[in-house]
Image (tube, helix red, strand yellow):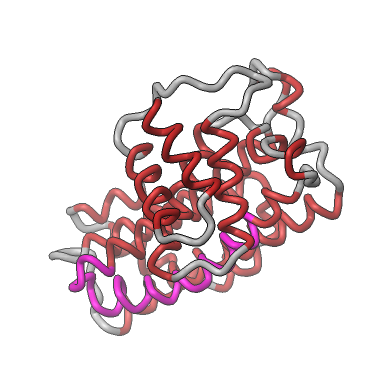
Amino acid sequence: KACVEALSIAFATITESSLVFDAMAALALFFENGSNALEATSPGKSGWEDFIHEGLFRMMRNKIPMKHRPNLFRLLNYMVSSQQSSWCISRGLARANRKPSDFCVLMAKLVMIESRVNSDDIARVVVDDGSKDKAAARKSLDTMASCYGIVEHSVVHLLATEEDSSNKEASMMWKDLPADKLLMLRDSFVDVVNASLDIVDYAGKALKANGCSFDGPNLGLVEALSVCFRLISTWMSVDAGSILDHVLNIIGSLETIVVHCEVKGPSRNILE
């Protein structure tokens, strides 16, 4: 815990040094490797959760070099998935004089933009190039998984009821956001889901037209489509009407993917 506290303080307070990006990368790596049992800070005290919140909010408000953006979304995904619903809403408000919606609305917009940019990378590196550049494919797939994970966990927070959390007040805070902010969140998340549908459509057409295959070394395509279908199914369970037309427009690609999944091999995981 002492290591995380030191890194989080550096992440929140350093402003003009590359060390802030090193701290962000170290935190993302640490949390992805067995830190689920990290002790939470006592209520009413500033702790590593507050410092990470502050650092992420500052990062999101500034222009971030492309090479550091994946770590931003990795860290965001971990914090949104591991913290209580109130973390996005209440952390840092007293100190920074912010509105409760500032963090989550900004996060949703950045996830939307990154998902759009990353969908082009997935199409080029994973689908067209067959994941031959393993480093580039891994980077794109990890970024996609982080962005889509943020949307999925945000949906969980938005749908949380009093019975779902030991902190009943916190579980309802997302729902208590102003209507216009909730609409902004929805619009951003719908754009992310539409980006995933575009990837599915592109992959289906590639399978049909170019002989692109699930078999062989391109397991990245299997992973990409699995992540896409998980997000799409999550969103359809809560707001199917917002993406229904898009889904109907790519029925042909969905059919092609299903046909290819009928063969034996790792591609069957997509349908499971």
82 or 256, nearer to the observer:
82
**x 21%, y 52%: residue:** 266
Quadrant holding the N terminus: top left
Q: Is residue 80 left or right of residue 216?
A: right
> Which residue is drawn at the image coordinates 71% and 26% (left, top)?
170
Residue 13, placed above or below residue 223: above
Please state the horizontal and vertical placement of residue 14, each as a whole percent of the image: 51, 52
Residue 20 image offset from top left, x and y in percent: 45, 54
Residue closest to the far left: 216
Q: On the rendered image, what quadrant is the C terminus found in? A: top left
Q: Residue at x 70, y 54 (%)?
A: 105
Using the rendered view, name the quadrant where residue 69 is placed: bottom left
Residue 205 relative to residue 220: left or right: right
Outermost bottom residue: 209
The region drawn magenta spans 107-136
Please, what is the dominant secondary structure of the magenta stretch?
helix
In this image, 8 relative to 101: left or right?
left
The reply, left or right, for residue 80 in relation to residue 99 is left
